[in-house]
Amino acid sequence: MKYPSRVSIVEVGARDGLQNEKQEVTAAVKIELVNRLSAAGFRNVEAGSFVSPKWVPQMATSADVMAGIERKPGVIYSVLTPNLKGFEGALAARADEVVIFGAASEAFSQKNINCSIAESIERFRPVAEAAKANGMRVRAAVSCALGCPYQGEVPIESVVDCVQRFADLGCDDIGIADTIGVGTPARVAAVFEAAARAYPLDQISGHFHDTYGQACANVLACLELGVSTFDTSVAGLGGCPYAKGATGNVATEDVLYMLHGMGIETGIDLDLVCEAGQFISQALGRAPHSRVNRALAAKRAG
């Protein structure tokens, strides 16, 4: 089996990981987290989200975070932008990349934003055009690609349709996300193989949640196809408000341990990531959700 020799990790803990946290995390803590992550070797760090604070109060500090971080040369600092107003915030904050999104589930799209999949993605056209006009990268995320909390299974053709629509917007990369963590390796492989027939494989990334403990296995299934970019979250931060018991994004530490054990290069220092995971977990008053982080901490204490 030939795996990619090098894998890129997009660290999403500071945005996707923290956005559902009920307790307030200060801008200072988020700035320290982002700085620790960029120092650990990540080339792309999701640092915030320019959404209405009414809907996502935790992200109200995103402008302060972007203003306060130490920007490392060569690191992409990305932010989520749901609309043109959000894009204006991202532009003012000097973001390098904007993230746009759409669900592969018609039921999810209707229930959450009261419009069809096609309409939801088309709404991002002005954002994508504005980003390109300002020299910014555009990354898209196809959510609910492996399952939906409202309709259950999501047809593969719906995922492919989303990929094609985002490709039409001129996206630089498209992520396929198992938002509620229900995917298993064979289904993941089928979805990614179909997506790769519609869009270049080297511009497709995987985004997995570990609700059912399948995330690392799903990453492996993608590696076997040649996928070489993944979203992960330090300390396994995150969750999904639509999936009861969801345990959040796959932990960065767990994925790095697996990749490094397979001889795959990432350019990321696992020890520094573990320290960042301990830092943010202590700020939240709990242990890291990463098994690797906990195991290495126990070994060091040992």
Image: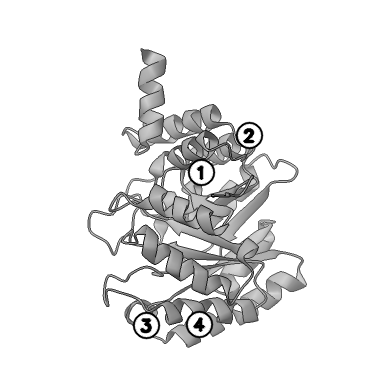
**Labels 3 & 1 near each other (Cβ < 8 A):** no
Mark 1: secondary structure: helix
Q: Earlier in the sequence, mark 1 or mark 4?
A: 1
Residue 288 position within the rendered picture, expressed as x and y whole percent measured from the top left: 36, 35
Q: Earlier in the sequence, mark 1 or mark 2?
A: 1
- Identify the residue under disc 4: 161
**Labels 1 & 2 near each other (Cβ < 8 A):** no
Classed neighbour count for the residue bearing mark 3: other residues with Cα under 10 Å, few (<14), some (14–19), many (≥20) = some
Identify which amino acid the numbered label 3 is placed on. Answer: Glu
Query: Mark 1 to mark 4: distance in Å?
Result: 38 Å
> Which disc is residue 106 wearing?
3
Identify which amino acid the numbered label 4 is placed on. Answer: Asp
Q: Is residue 138 left or right of residue 46?
A: right
Choose mark 3 or mark 2, whichever is in front. Answer: 3
- Identify the residue under disc 1: 27
Compared to residue 256, the image places residue 172 above or below, namely: below
Query: Mark 2 to mark 4: distance in Å?
Result: 38 Å
**Labels 3 & 2 near each other (Cβ < 8 A):** no
> Which disc is residue 59 wearing?
none
Residue shown at 36% from the left, 26% from the top: 295
**Labels 3 & 4 near each other (Cβ < 8 A):** no
Identify which amino acid the numbered label 1 is placed on. Answer: Ala
Identify which amino acid the numbered label 2 is placed on. Answer: Ala
Residue 267 position within the rendered picture, expressed as x and y whole percent measured from the top left: 64, 37
Choose mark 1 or mark 2, whichever is in front. Answer: 2
Query: Mark 3 to mark 1: distance in Å?
Result: 36 Å
Q: Which sits in the foreground, 25 or 76?
A: 76
Residue 64 shows up from this direction: no
- Identify the residue under disc 2: 39
Q: Is residue 11 left or right of residue 138?
A: left
Residue shown at 60% from the left, 75% from the top: 84
Compared to residue 94, the image places residue 279 above or below, namely: above
